[in-house]
Amino acid sequence: MGVAVEVKNIAPSRLHVLFACLGITFLLIFSWVLFHEGTAEWRTTQARFRQLERGVKNPHQLAQSAGVGGLRQIWLPDLGRIDRCETCHLGIDDPAFAGAPAPFAAHPGTWLSTHPTDRFGCTPCHDGQGQATDYATVAHQPQPFVTRPMRPLETIEANCGTCHRALDPPEAPRLAEGRRLIVESGCFSCHEIPGFEGMTFRGPSLDSVGYKVRPAWLASWLRDPKSYLPQSKMGNFHLSADEIGSLEGFLLSQRTQVPLDSTGVDWKKADTANGRALFGELRCVSCHAVNGRGGTLGPELTRIGDKVRRDWLFSYLKDPHRVQADTPMLQYRLNDAQWRDITAFLLEQYSSADAGAEPPPVTYQDARQLAAGRAVFERRGCPSCHRLAAIKETGRIGPSLAGIADRDPDELPYGKNVVRHTTDNYIFLKVLLPDTLGQPSTMPTFGFTPADAARITLALASIRKSDLPASYVLRRPAPAPYRPGGTFGELVGRYRCLSCHTVGGFGGDLSTVPLDRIGSQLQRDYVAKYLINPGAVRVSVEARMPVFHMLPDEAKTIADYLSVVFLDDSFEQYDTRFTAEEARRGQDLYGKLGCQACHQLGTKGGYVGPELSTTGTRLKPGWIAAWLSTPQTYKPGTLQPDYGLSGADARALTAYLTSLGRNDAAKARGGTTP
Amino acid sequence: MTTRVWHASAVTVLTLITSAACRTGPRSQPGDPMLDAIRAEEREGKLTYVESQGKRLFVRYCATCHGDEARGDGQNASNLSPAPPDMTTSKTSQDPALIRRVIAEGSAAVGRSPLSPPWGRSLSQQQIDYLVAYCQSMGRKKP
């Protein structure tokens, strides 16, 4: 109404002028819009492309692609995305434009053959503003309020991980390393992390820690674990002196489990030379490093003498499963004198000069101190990693990391760090330096290297809100636990076969030999002998299989079981009636294919693959033929190349290899075994 | 009169807010620590991302004979006759078509000894692309 009243008051001539001005203004705006759209960046880019195309394609191909123009977009309703990148990236899936200048070049590599653009678009992998068609302003560069600008190539593996949920996605090595670091560090003990469900982290059980450790060591460990063990998986909690004091008192009072009786052990008779010999023979370094060298399955032993008490160590070595039922450490079959020698050797060899004599156990009775120590223990989330009978399960202390990659980067804290606000930078800083983000943090500083922190960041940055259609998600189901029963089951438990070997994917990855078809690979007699006295079959690889001091009956039980149960029928049916001619041809092929580059035979050949001079008494022929034909089927990533052998060639090589180390077979061939 | 002043000031404030929102002036450059850390690997070897992917594969599959730095000094090199060449100075590694053929079909396929095996059936096309890219980077001057 107000407007109508005003219009009445204006003289008609002035009204005409006003309309004229408005009309001209609108005309100007309209022509500016037309001009702007007509000269849009993408139009000039497309014109440049047409020019380039004339040089690359023949007239027939040109006629076919003539209709392609205007705004081009890929609509992916499943992913909720509209990507207009192809408006300018016109040659992206056309091999004719390989090596063409940007933005017309074909996509490098073979990625588009596995990730066709009509299913995956562009931004699911690259991020960026899919709907933008201007280079400088919005499509590629970081912009205010754009939460996911285009990823640089170096961090793109984070987006691989959104769909590829298996722990070691192919061709994304940094993402795989990040995920491995998460598993190793046990981040899921405190945080719920999608993709790591059901995994548990095993810190040492603390029920007998009062018997286990020296007080001075415990105090320094709580102050900074890295001062004792640079590779420590426990982070630095930056505890105050008071907290350390009360926590130390609380922990040293934990003596629920008394060590095995060692009063009958005569420590004066301990023979450390024998202990040293046993330390080598048991292959302790396969799992435990000393002086920085060795395995990482168990803790490093370089300064073990500063840490543990003698009687506890003796008792633990004798029966580790009593202290921690889920430890990967096996139980050797040694007598008390042998354990005494090893204990004495470890304490003497691997301790600092200033370690001093073992102090007598202290009894803490100050109830207030104990309560304070218990409170620190619970508040800092210690029960997440360490089992303690006195404390109930407290659940996860850290926040869930579900959808962490989709948090708004501008709402995250960065403290005084002058960084670009991205979820990547936030996660990176939180992993590397959790105390610098300007908020009180219960998270300890784990002391990752920046490179490792960046890889963990890649792994976490792949965890987005779970609205991805199931058809895009690739995951590998967790392997079913394998727990055999009977005598065999007891032996597998005692000697912890599955700490290093896998069955159906379940088990440890220290060994390169899965057991699933081992009965069809190895001859039974060889297995029985190997279990008693395992030696390396590779020249360059240090033997890692422990000498268990297993009883002959036990070795026979295991060998029998493996050769009856762990079979692959397809190998068993192989015709093993080789002719001398086949074996001779196999010997020729062995040289022609260059097998000697990697395999040693007698004194000649390389160090990479197994030594072959006893193959005839070690491997079964069906397995040799199958392995030679398609090695990758049986061990993805193996260094044995697939030569694409014909059945006859594989058979000839098998005939030759089977004859090695067997006098009867060598005679039949008319040659000698090298 | 008061209404006019009020209107004028409202318009001014709106204009200021709008212009502030549309500001595209130069900003201070905050750091990108995550990207710096993940680029360390490439920076160290002066490699691109693609070349560094190739280097990983090289170390896994090739270095036992060719050596970690491709100088023909891997731990298995002494067992080989002919010995593996120093790839940083060899012309073969600079010829993408030839080096691709050697990797995929083995050295025997280009008339040399059979000691370098064919990887074409074991590695993916993409992995071989990475390896070729890394081989070509070898001729570049390194610090």
Image (cartoon, coloured by chain):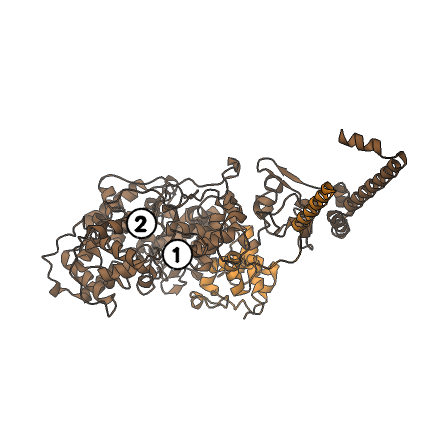
User: Image quarter for residue A666?
Assistant: bottom left
Q: Chain of mark 2?
A: A
Which quadrant is home to the C terminus of chain A?
bottom left
Badges 1 and 2: C-beta atoms under 8 Å apart?
A: no
Q: CA distance from mark 1 to mark 2?
A: 14 Å
* Chain coloured orange here: B
Q: Which residue is mark 1?
A: A445
- Viewer-proximal residue among A566 and A597: A566
Left or right of A603 on screen, residue A629: right
Q: Amino acid at mark 1?
A: Thr
Q: What is the residue that sits farthest to the top in this orientation?
A: A1
**Where residue A53 sits in the image (x, y, percent)?**
75, 50
Image colour assigned to chain A: brown
Q: Amino acid at mark 2?
A: Cys
Crowdedness near tag 2: few (<14), some (14–19) or many (≥20) residues, C-alpha within 10 Å: some
Q: What is the residue that sits farthest to the right in this orientation?
A: A13
